[in-house]
Image (cartoon, helix red, strand yellow):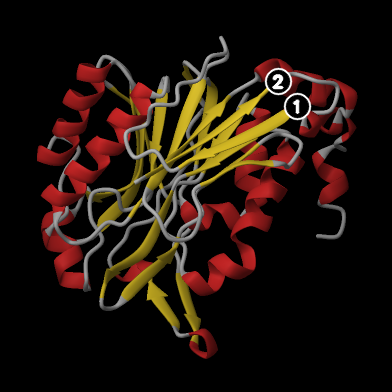
Amino acid sequence: MRLFTALRERRPSLAAGLLALRSKAARGQIRMSSSLPVAAVCQMTATPDKDANFSACTRLVEQAKEGGASMVFLPEGFDYIGSNREETLVLSETLDGDIITRYTHLARKLDVWLSLGGFHERGHDWKTDRRIYNSHIIINGQGEIVSVYRKGHLFDVELTSKGVSLRESAFTVPGTRLLPPVQTPIGKVGLGVCYDLRFPELSSALQRHGAEILTYPSAFTVATGVAHWEVLLRARAIETQCFVLAAAQVGAHHAKRTSYGHALAVDPWGVVIGDCGGSDVGVTLIQIDLQALQDIRRDMPVQQHRREKDFYCSLD
């Protein structure tokens, strides 16, 4: 396990204030020293073994807490990544099942907020249609579930030339609405999941409703990750002037699936301030400077320059 730490100071230029420190320390001795709130963006390699995955995530959360994090972000599929459709469905649970109960206890024990992105939640019509939601859950430091966003855009893609074939809609029900950003110890967090990243309408809506931090827990394929992962995350940060935090899966989950990794944190100027790399399980610790965010929005008031809706629909 690796710990990646990003420290930054407030300067006129957000990029100029960045000091990135990387450590191979497996025990996470580095702790943030500033009064700014700290977020932890995690990278893991989930398998179909739910107990092993929970143990791995617990170690990441404990390491993040030791580093001073008040909120920890885990990736899509943190609970498991199945090797086939049937296994994915059989392993799924409800929100009041064993896995989420374990995480509520962990959050309360450590007094830390958790972003659990991409939980395999059994759908409301499970008994009749046997489909699930891809759910992003926020748990507060008292162990209470405070928000559950169900992924709205499903990954149905056939990239034959790149060996990518996934049809999420075969077993997943799309969510029906966005949720208001959640007030957390690090700021107001807007929720998405993985493929939602490709739809700027979602991030813009969350920003209009007060989001200061956008989060996209993901399990990107290697082919799409190499081409699009960083540029999409940076674009969402730049256009919304938000921090963007994207926990990620990395490496081989089983014989049929491998993920790209590079769990990233991006600041509101579009600078990558944390990257877990493309091979190791680990955590990147990020200080969230909301004053710097407000300075950027003041100096470049993009949202004030946005035209009325009719202007953008004038070609329809």
Residue holding disc 1: 17
The dot on residue 9 is 2
Q: Look at the numbered disc 2 and give the secondary structure of its residue.
A: loop
Q: Decide which of 155, 185 is in the foreground and name it.
A: 185
Q: Position of residue 163 (x, y in %)?
A: 45, 85
Q: Quick check: marks 2 and 1 in contact, CB under 8 Å?
A: yes
Relative horizontal placement of residue 288, taking residue 93 as reference (left or right)? right
Relative horizontal placement of residue 279, taking residue 229 as reference (left or right)? left
Q: Position of residue 174 (x, y in %)?
A: 39, 55
Quarter of the view holding residue 73: top left
Relative horizontal placement of residue 206, taking residue 241 as reference (left or right)? left
Residue 43 visible in the snapshot: no
The dot on residue 276 is none
Relative horizontal placement of residue 157, taking residue 273 as reference (left or right)? left
Q: Look at the numbered disc 1 and give the secondary structure of its residue.
A: helix
Q: Where is residue 80 in the image (x, y as percent from the top left)?
A: 23, 55
Q: What residue is drawn where x is 85% and y is 21%?
A: 12
